[in-house]
Image (cartoon, coloured by chain):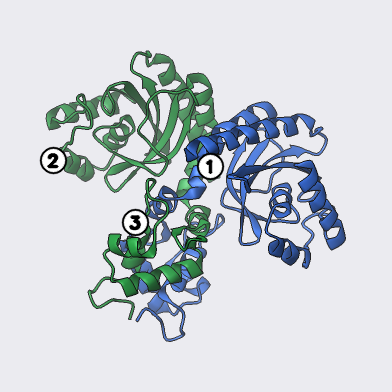
Chain colours: A blue, B green
Amino acid sequence: MANSASGDSMTERIVRVLETFTSERTVQTTAEIGRRAELPSSSAHRIVDELVRAGLLERDEDHRIRLGLRLWELALRGSTALRLRQAALPHMESVQAAVREHTQLAVLEQDEALFLERLSHPQAGANITRVAGRLPLHASSSGLVLLAHAPLALRERVLAGPLRALARETITDAAVLRRRIADVRREGFVVAPGSIEQVSTGVAVPIRDAGEVVAALSVVLPRETPPGPALAALKQAASAIEAALRADRR
Amino acid sequence: MANSASGDSMTERIVRVLETFTSERTVQTTAEIGRRAELPSSSAHRIVDELVRAGLLERDEDHRIRLGLRLWELALRGSTALRLRQAALPHMESVQAAVREHTQLAVLEQDEALFLERLSHPQAGANITRVAGRLPLHASSSGLVLLAHAPLALRERVLAGPLRALARETITDAAVLRRRIADVRREGFVVAPGSIEQVSTGVAVPIRDAGEVVAALSVVLPRETPPGPALAALKQAASAIEAALRADRR
């Protein structure tokens, strides 16, 4: 009933339509959406019309389409990510007050680090991450923390590669990555200079909930900044977030 | 093709499924989802299965269903709300540093105030608002700011009532509300003691982008706190957010 002639479900088609929107492309025509979602024009128009009626998309005065606030509201309202983020935010602000660069919260999602939150000082240095953006596990400091505590099958899948270089110092050798992961598990933190951008160092620690690592808390520093004070602020914040998550469970 | 026997589209059914998740109900069985979404059991199972395959829902080890991070990611990645929120967040932190209670960002959505962000001091007083939560326009300080600058048709629709009382001091008289709206437009801010909770005062100011009011920035104070310093911090932050939005347009 809900399947098209080509066999993909309506759900898949709706997701393909939503996926055409990115941080660089927040407004599109229905024709552009159809082309990017690889949908026949008639299907694209019908799905976009339905999504506009449901409020998941919005049509502006020029008939261009953008994501609707209703989608954001539905996604956040019942979300466990929101619980983690709300528990973390006050303590991310404490890190930010001490470090005044970028402070970020990431979770493991489909073999990548997905960034739930980022606080940035207006005068802070370079930082490629975005809220709702992703980075590879082997390259980012947050990713290395998440990878080190990921299920074995996922770790082996990532170690099997490919390990793409994002910068000259990204770890691209599986044996080196394996040792690095063991270090992270033993030491409880990551300092990763130049692995994403040559001018920056990522510093990350794990956050545990009910005994499991559920997120990585990180800062991005200019390369010349010693990581010690940031690491101390991160460890203190991670403990406070873990306490907030425990209190929230009761 | 995409319509069920009862005439509702697949999109509507998917939205009904997503709507069953709330901040109080983040995990459900498929049977509960079907009942709450008023879907036949077979449809509920098929739609939930499709949404799980697409990552918009997730199934835990007990086969219970929760919202997927993929939904959150899709909703935020291409969102104009995210642009507003990212522009506002550093300046909300400045308000928070000065006021140390609750600082909130709200937009107009379907005749209500929808809260995009909330920062709360760990020792702050009472506050009913939640991120991705809503409050009536006539009752909340943010709502009064948004209502005062809303299109005329929306203002008249809200004034025509009903004006439900959330607390003893909520404005429920249309003539009083009309005068209050005129005050807000003239004065450029709202101080609303006891309109949501007897123990709290809401203070809100508008945020403009390209000449239009696009959001309300507010704090919630304990009733006994004089609102002057919070209002000064809000006005300063609103100017800074407006400058950030202007810079972002270039």
User: What numbered label is drawn on residue A97?
Assistant: none
- The answer to whether dots 3 and 2 both sit on one chain is yes
Dot 1 corresponds to which residue?
A85
Q: Secondary structure at mark 2?
A: loop
Dot 2 corresponds to which residue?
B160
Amino acid of disc 2: Ala
> Quick check: B8 above or below A221?
below
Dot 3 corresponds to which residue?
B20
Amino acid of disc 1: Arg
A82 left or right, relative to B148:
right
Is mark 3 in CB contact (under 8 Å) with mark 1?
A: no
- Please, which chain is the residue tagged with disc 1 on? A
Percent coordinates x, y for residue B84 in the rendering: 48, 42
Specify whether residue A31 is in view. Answer: no
Q: Secondary structure at mark 1?
A: helix
**How far is disc 1 from disc 2 in space, using C-alphas?**
39 Å
**How far is disc 3 from disc 1 in space, using C-alphas?**
21 Å
Amino acid of disc 3: Thr
